[in-house]
Amino acid sequence: MANYHDASISKAQKIAGYAMSILFSIQIIIAGVMKLFLAAPIVENMNTVTNWGDKTLFVGILELILLALYWTPKTQKLGFYLLCSFVGGVIVAEVVAGKFPFAGILVSVLLYAGTTLRFPKLLK
């Protein structure tokens, strides 16, 4: 049976954790799919922020693979840690580009808070 949360958490904690994790996942899915279709604004932004416009497809595929790892019960922890690293890289790229990393911070907070609400033992 799939285990997407600890059995010992409260109902409110479970709902809040899933809400944050799903919001995070929706953002990653949208970003990944837009990169797969090489949407012009995304490619332009990738060129502006990291000069990686030619690697947009690779980054989109990577986002979706990491998200699949995150939602697969046997690889949830690996997916979580890899997504934390990925989102950290997004924040760094935005800072290097001279932008305030609001999007990266928001996504990382949703990822971390949602996951730790569902798996409190992850912090121990």
Image (cartoon, rainbow, N blue to C red):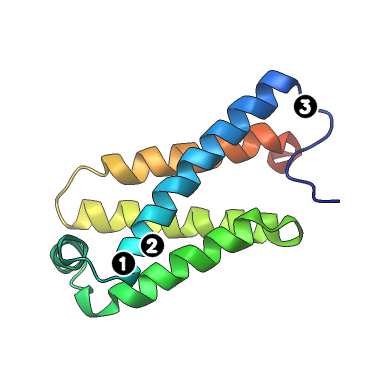
Decide which of tag 3 and tag 1 comes sooner along the chain. 3
Q: CA distance from mark 3 to mark 1?
A: 36 Å
The quarter in which the C terminus is drawn is top right
Decide which of tag 2 and tag 3 comes sooner along the chain. 3
On the picture, is 24 further left or further right than 49? Answer: right
Few, some or many residues within 10 Å of mark 1 (<14, 14–19, 20+): many
Q: Is the residue under label 2 in contact with that under label 1 (CB below 8 Å)?
A: yes
| Disc sitting over residue 32 in the figure | 2
**Residue 65, position as x, y percentages in the image:** 53, 68
Residue at horizontal 38%, vertical 68%? 60
On the picture, is 44 further left or further right than 4? Answer: left
* Three-letter amino acid code of the residue under disc 1: Lys
Few, some or many residues within 10 Å of mark 2 (<14, 14–19, 20+): many
Q: Which residue is mark 3?
A: 9
Could you say whether the residue bearing mark 1 is in a helix, strand or loop? helix
| Disc sitting over residue 35 in the figure | 1
**Residue 71, position as x, y percentages in the image:** 64, 54
Could you say whether the residue bearing mark 3 is in a helix, strand or loop? loop
Relative height, residue 61 to residue 19 (above, below):
below
* Three-letter amino acid code of the residue under disc 2: Gly
- Find the residue positioned furthest to the bottom: 54
Q: CA distance from mark 1 to mark 2?
A: 5 Å
Relative height, residue 85 to residue 123 (above, below):
below
Q: Give 26 or 76, whichever is nearer the viewer.
A: 26
Residue at horizontal 69%, vertical 28%? 14
Quarter of the image where one finds residue 8: top right
* Three-letter amino acid code of the residue under disc 3: Ile
**Residue 28, position as x, y percentages in the image:** 42, 53
